[in-house]
Image: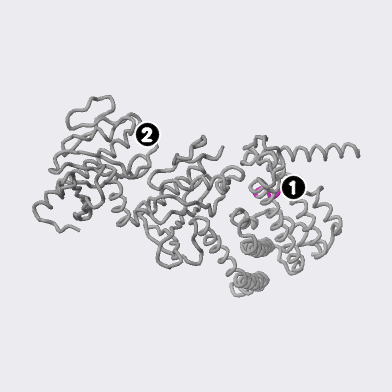
């Protein structure tokens, strides 16, 4: 498998906005909706995903020449599951309260399509440097998406940001924003906004 | 060529096999390195709460105990922690560990109770994954502190409005009534189970505390407890040493939880003289009290009493159920019948066989 395709820089930049995993590829929706009720949980999830994505991409890229086409998904899953287990254990060791708060969502990173997609699209085809910068770009893009949704939900739903009060005491917390419907509403509106901006830019260029 | 195919599979899978082995070894290493710390985190989270939930207790002077309860036919083990005073013998209080279903998933709660299991000294929500920003507020200090000093002999309910300090209920979290009530139910159930476990001594203490309330002027020395089979009959004496009443205790499930009563009959065990509540967790108990339901048993013949519907006038051996508290009324009626039957049998035995008194 030759190392052809976009350069490391291009991969990195694409992950931020043009190929943002949430707003452009619509991948990784489960954690996006489930843990974006607060910034603390969202950023911890983004950190865990970044660790797994970077490690999985680097390892997959290192062994890309040994991969058999029909066994590649198995290898990806095996690799991802290992790094997710490590992330889960490290969280339980170093951030026990956060680990209990995130509950099953950390182990569920195993089935996060963002990671397996990057392994398939980039890491299994390109060099380690490109795969690593792709993973970093995608991780930052994922973190940005999670942060945008979580900040809207936490500020409107709880009146706080990272647990600190930012809205006046008189602010009536919008309960729905921290509940599942709030996650869908926020995601839908932000997704619409991202598409609208993208369309506006496209028409400007043309 | 099956043999060649087998070899090919192995040849193709060598990478997967090597990776699986390497990853397994790596995970074993991570487990070895971190497991002790993770277990310590879990342990500490529980033990760190002991001084908070049992005032004055030290987490280094704790005995861990367990008891089994019957949950739908299956025996489930419950853990409790007994905090000891510096002398190493006196109990300062207990911390119970329990869990139950919340709105989203299981909620784990630590409950502190005083040494006599009379009042709650604090609760701590150990684990929960309720709705962030709503149900998750059961872990806030504001919510958990509401349980402090609540009685263990009455149920705690999550009400939608702010509660007066003397109330045994708490204020539910807005938009998270189910999560709030789940914590209350876990606390109510756990305390009841633990009290039942400690029953033998506590039950007697409770009865001896309540009987002087039923008979003003009667001191503890005027109450003699006599074992009768699996139960205990209390003989109440007047100042001259004459028997004025026989008291027995009984309990049954009400509408919400167990109702426990003391029932007294006269010296001849012919007439019901008092019905006194020891423990109840019924939501509409006020209706029972307002309707004078317990008093309606007084003066009835000590035989089987039948409960009639709220609008039906009761006859000689009947009592009238309380509107909107029919199940509770029925439970009370059955308890009274149970106790009266037990008292009549026991009193007859005691008189006839001269049972040894403690």
User: What quarter of the picture does the C terminus of chain A occupy?
Assistant: top right
- Judging from the image, mark 2 belongs to the subunit labelled B
Lateral position of residue A187 relative to residue A175, left or right: right
For the record, the magenta segment spans A23-30
Which residue is pictured at 85% across the width and 36% down the height?
A: A200
Looking at the image, is A126 positioned above or below residue B340?
Answer: below
Mark number, residue A145: 1
Q: Position of residue A76 (x, y in %)?
A: 68, 62
- A52 vs B295, left or right, is right
Q: Position of residue A55 (x, y in %)?
A: 73, 64
Cβ–Cβ under 8 Å for marks 1 and 2: no
- Tell me the chief SS of the magenta region: loop
**Crowding at mark 1 (Cα within 10 Å: few <14, some 14-19, many 20+):** many
**Could you say which is closer to the camera, residue B294 or residue A159?**
B294
Residue A25 included in the magenta stretch of the image: yes
Residue farthest along the front direction in this orientation: B240
The stretch drawn in magenta includes residue B348:
no
Secondary element under disc 2, as helix, strand or loop, is helix
- Which disc is residue B286 wearing? 2
Q: Position of residue B290 (x, y in %)?
A: 34, 30
Instruction: Name the residue rendered at 56%, 47% in the picture.
Output: B130
Q: Quadrant of the N terminus of chain A?
A: bottom right
User: In the figure, residue B307 lies in which quadrant?
Assistant: top left
Q: How far, Cα to Cα, is label 1 from label 2?
A: 54 Å
């Amino acid at each position: 498998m030759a190392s052809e395709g976009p350069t490391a820089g291009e991969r990195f930049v694409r992950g931020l906005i043009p190929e943002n995993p949430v707003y452009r590829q619509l991948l990784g929706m489960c954690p996006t909706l489930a843990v974006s009720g607060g910034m603390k949980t969202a950023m911890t999830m983004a950190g865990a995903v970044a660790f797994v994505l970077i490690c999985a991409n680097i390892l997959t890229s290192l062994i890309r020449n040994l991969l058999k086409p029909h066994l590649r998904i198995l290898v990806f899953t095996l690799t991802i599951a290992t790094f997710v287990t490590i992330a889960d254990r490290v969280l339980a060791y170093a951030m026990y309260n956060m680990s209990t708060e995130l509950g099953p969502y950390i182990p569920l990173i195993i089935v996060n399509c963002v990671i397996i997609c990057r392994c398939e699209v980039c890491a299994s085809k390109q060099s380690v440097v490109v795969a690593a910068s792709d993973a970093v770009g995608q991780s930052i893009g994922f973190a940005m998406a999670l942060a945008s949704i979580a900040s809207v939900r936490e500020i409107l739903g709880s009146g706080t940001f990272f647990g600190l009060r930012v809205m006046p005491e008189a602010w009536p917390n919008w309960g729905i924003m921290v509940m599942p419907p709030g996650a869908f509403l926020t995601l839908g509106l932000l997704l619409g906004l991202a598409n609208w901006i993208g369309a506006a830019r496209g028409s400007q260029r043309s | 060529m099956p043999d060649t195919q087998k070899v090919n599979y192995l040849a193709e899978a060598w990478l997967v096999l090597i990776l699986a082995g390497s990853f397994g070894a790596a995970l074993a290493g991570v487990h070895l390195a971190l497991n002790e710390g993770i277990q310590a985190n879990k342990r500490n989270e529980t033990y760190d709460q002991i001084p908070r939930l049992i005032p004055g207790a030290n987490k280094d002077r704790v005995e861990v105990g367990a008891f089994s309860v019957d949950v739908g036919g299956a025996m489930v083990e419950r853990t409790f922690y007994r905090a000891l005073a510096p002398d190493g013998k006196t109990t300062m209080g207990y911390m119970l560990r329990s869990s139950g279903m919340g709105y989203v998933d299981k909620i784990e709660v630590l409950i502190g109770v005083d040494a006599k299991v009379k009042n709650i000294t604090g609760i701590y929500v150990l684990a929960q994954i309720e709705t962030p920003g709503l149900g998750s507020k059961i872990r806030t200090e504001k919510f958990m502190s509401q349980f402090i000093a609540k009685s263990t002999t009455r149920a705690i309910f999550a009400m939608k409005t702010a509660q007066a300090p003397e109330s045994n209920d708490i204020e539910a979290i807005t938009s998270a009534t189910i999560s709030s009530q789940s914590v209350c139910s876990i606390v109510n159930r756990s305390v009841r189970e633990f009290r039942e476990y400690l029953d033998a001594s506590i039950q007697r203490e409770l009865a001896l505390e309540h009987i002087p309330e039923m008979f003003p002027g009667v001191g503890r020395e005027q109450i003699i407890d006599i074992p009768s089979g699996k139960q205990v009959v209390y003989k109440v004496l007047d100042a001259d040493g004459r028997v004025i009443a026989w008291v027995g205790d009984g309990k049954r499930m009400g509408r919400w939880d167990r109702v426990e009563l003391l029932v007294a009959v006269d010296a001849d065990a012919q007439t019901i003289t008092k019905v006194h509540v020891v423990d109840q967790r019924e939501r509409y108990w006020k209706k029972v009290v307002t309707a004078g339901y317990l008093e309606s048993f007084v003066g009835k013949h000590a035989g089987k009493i039948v409960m009639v519907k709220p609008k039906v006038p009761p006859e000689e051996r009947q009592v009238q159920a309380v509107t909107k508290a029919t199940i509770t009324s029925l439970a009370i009626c059955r308890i009274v019948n149970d106790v009266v039957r037990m008292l009549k049998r026991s009193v007859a035995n005691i008189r006839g066989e001269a049972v040894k008194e403690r």
